[in-house]
Amino acid sequence: MHRSMIFGFAFLWAAAWSTVSRADARVESIDFPTAGGFEARADLYEPEAPSPTLIILFHQAGWSRGEYREIAPKLTALGYRVMAVDQRSGKGVGGVANETAKRAQSKGSPQDYLDAYPDLEAALGHARQELNAKQIIVWGSSYSASLVLRLAAEHPEQIAAVVAFSPGEYFKKSKGPAYVEGFAKRVKQPLFITSSKNERAQVKPIFDASPSEKKILFTPASGGQHGSRALWEKQPDHDVYWTAIKGFLKEYAPARPGT
């Protein structure tokens, strides 16, 4: 069953939780090899109790893993391991520089949006082989929200669920007007897509293309935000976004399946 929702309120079952700071989560920076002969940088956040489920977070254009400094600890509080990745396309945000981008530049590697796709594949491989993740959720923001749909389409056996904040056809000039929609047609995993209210027309064809029987399209009744920053506490409607994503994760991709 799939659902399309426009909400301005919280799910009644959802429990509020106190603000979790970065210091409250166990976090370390790690490096892993990626295409081009250099290493990508990521922050690995660990929950208090071991978890078989890892969420890989990818940032939006021009930014870094710093997009998730506030978000990741809240996901660990829900029981997930979290890996926030620097892709080679970006600079920084929140005082966190994009180390992968620096290394790519030093190697003379191209740094457009699509050039970052090997970093997503490398992160997935590292999560499976080195971090021993048993269940992996991929999560993208803006251009990387589109790329996680490709990742899920091309690696269906390795990815348990997909979260996409503001995906779109960002590669029209080089790949045509329905490049992302083409990958969405192959995404059968549980799928959560959200955006700002004025981006709904942009994301709905992508959502509709997916044959997943467990998918949710969430649009806030308020104006909303572009990308994963919708979850930052300074955003006036962050709570409704949190309620929606928590509901999806609890129902379709729990941190500890079967518990």
Image (tube, grey):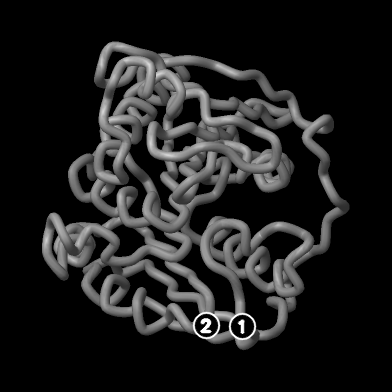
Against 182, residue 32 (above or below) is: above
Q: Residue at x 72, y 40 (%)?
A: 73
In the displayed orientation, state which residue is furthest to the right.
18
- Pick the quarter of the image with the C terminus: top right
Q: Residue at x 20, y 67 (%)?
A: 181
* Residue type pointed to by label 1: Gly
Q: Residue at x 38, y 69 (%)?
A: 215
Question: Judging from the image, what secondary structure is the residue with disc 2 in?
Answer: helix
Against 28, residue 160 (above or below) is: below
Q: Find residue 239 and report its image quarter.
A: bottom right
Task: Residue 137 in the image: state x and y as whole percent.
Answer: 44, 44
Against 32, residue 167 (above or below) is: below
Q: Which residue is mark 2?
A: 197
Task: Residue 31 in the image: state x and y as whole percent.
Answer: 48, 15
Q: Nearer the viewer, residue 180 or 18?
A: 180
Please say whether residue 28 is visible from this viewpoint. yes
Q: Which residue is mark 1?
A: 223
Q: Is the Cβ of the residue at disc 1 closer than 8 Å to that at disc 2?
A: yes
Q: Find residue 192 and report its image quarter.
A: bottom left
